[in-house]
């Protein structure tokens, strides 16, 4: 059972890997920061480890039947974007387990962005692990697709697994299903944020290209004016309101300063938006504001902001 628990953790870990990408509408990408200034590329290596001080737990009938105090998962993302985004598992390890375990099949993971968050739903497929329980060999797996849990994006991304896995091999002494609970943190890369794709930008230029506020004192207010320019030959029109992700409460639009939303721009015309950084604590902040175009080519622009409270 402990084995099963480990495999589940592993699958979850890989799911985080699979979330890298940027692309088509409805797809999922993984970013380096809340503002999605950089998207992780296909083939990015991701490593997960069991959170310090925690244990992976396998249960049956309300009782704990196996635990592991250490586990790691390694793999690579299959693409930059996907619906969902997938990744392959290359290595599953575990330690401090109460039962002898070994991986039968590594399998794969997928992750799909959860609307209005920087998190993703993780699903594992094709993973199988064998555990010695009650003196017999019991194998559990994720089958064609098992919901593992949620990957919470951030500077210290956390994959929390809470699921049920099915027996794929073993005698009558092996429980037909088992509960799996565990928490994994990403050790490489250290920051992972789950996002929808950035808007396909063919027409809108921005000056500056992104708003980097640097270090600012907690409680202070710092503004940057951004100019958007229509770089296409035909008119474009922005949607009535932009949308945001990340720390948009601290990195937001100054009231009354948005001269772009709902505005139609002729070729080479410009409009301005004033962004403000108001740090509330001593840490890094990041946000992404999407200005979608509803007329003309281009899709719009995803604008990234960052700053650090000091």
Image: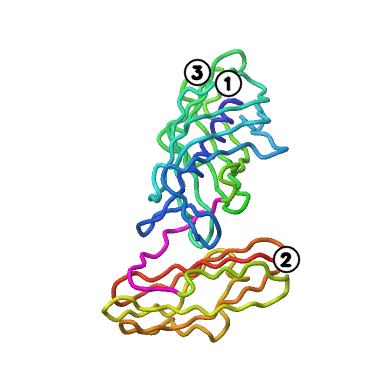
- On the image, numbered disc 2 is attached to which residue? 310
Quadrant in the rendering for residue 135: top right
Q: Residue at x 51, y 22 (%)?
A: 139
Tell me the mark number nearer the camera, choosing from 3 and 2.
2
Q: Going from the N terminus, do you reach mark 2 or mark 1 first?
A: 1
Disc 1 to disc 3, C-alpha distance: 14 Å
Q: Going from the N terminus, do you reach mark 1 or mark 3 first?
A: 1
**What is the image's colouring?**
rainbow
Disc 2 to disc 1, C-alpha distance: 47 Å
Tell me the mark number nearer the camera, choosing from 1 and 3.
1
Residue 29's tag is none
Residue 170's tag is 3
Q: Position of residue 237 (x, y in %)?
A: 35, 80
Is residue 84 shown above or below 176? below
Quadrant in the rendering for residue 58: top right
Residue 101's tag is 1
Density class for disc 3 (Cα within 10 Å; few <14, some 14-19, many ≥20) is some
Q: Position of residue 240 (x, y in %)?
A: 42, 80
Front residue of this view, candidates 305 and 130: 305
Tell me the mark number nearer the camera, choosing from 2 and 1.
2
Disc 3 to disc 2, C-alpha distance: 57 Å
Q: Main secondary structure of the magenta part?
A: loop
Q: Position of residue 174 (x, y in %)?
A: 55, 20
Density class for disc 1 (Cα within 10 Å; few <14, some 14-19, many ≥20) is many
Label 1: state its secondary structure: strand
Q: Which residues are magenta?
A: 192-206
Front residue of this view, candidates 242 and 229: 229
Left or right relative to 180: residue 196: left
The reply to whether the magenta stretch includes residue 83 is: no
Label 3: state its secondary structure: loop
Placement of the C terminus among the 4 image quadrants: bottom right
Q: How many marks?
A: 3
């Amino acid at each position: 059972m402990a084995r099963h628990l480990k495999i589940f953790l592993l699958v979850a870990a890989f799911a985080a890997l699979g979330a890298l990408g940027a692309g088509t509408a409805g797809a999922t990408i993984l970013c380096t920061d809340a503002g999605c200034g950089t998207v992780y590329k296909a083939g990015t290596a991701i490593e997960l480890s069991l959170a310090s001080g925690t244990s992976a737990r396998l249960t049956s009938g309300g009782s704990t039947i196996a635990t592991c105090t250490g586990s790691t998962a390694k793999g690579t993302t299959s693409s930059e974007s996907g619906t969902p985004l997938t990744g392959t598992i290359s290595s599953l390890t575990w330690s401090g387990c109460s039962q002898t375990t070994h991986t039968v099949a590594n399998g794969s993971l997928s992750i799909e962005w959860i609307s209005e968050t920087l998190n993703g739903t993780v699903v594992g497929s094709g993973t199988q692990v064998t555990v010695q329980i009650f003196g017999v060999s019991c194998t559990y797996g994720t089958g064609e697709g098992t919901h593992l849990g949620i990957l919470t994006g951030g500077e210290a991304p956390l994959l929390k697994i809470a699921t049920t896995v099915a027996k794929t091999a073993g005698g009558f002494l092996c429980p037909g299903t088992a509960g799996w609970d565990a928490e994994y943190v990403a050790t490489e890369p250290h920051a992972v944020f789950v996002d929808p794709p950035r808007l396909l930008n063919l027409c809108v230029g921005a000056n500056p290209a992104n708003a980097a506020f640097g270090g600012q004192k907690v409680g202070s207010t710092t503004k940057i004016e951004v100019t958007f320019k229509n770089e296409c030959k035909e008119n474009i029109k922005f949607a009535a309101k932009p949308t945001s992700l990340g720390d948009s409460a601290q990195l937001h639009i100054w009231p009354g300063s948005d001269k772009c939303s709902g505005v139609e721009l002729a070729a080479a015309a410009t409009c301005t938006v004033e962004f403000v950084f108001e740090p509330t604590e001593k840490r890094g902040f990041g946000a992404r504001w999407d200005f979608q175009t509803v007329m003309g080519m281009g899709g719009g622009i995803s604008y990234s902001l960052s700053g650090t409270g000091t």
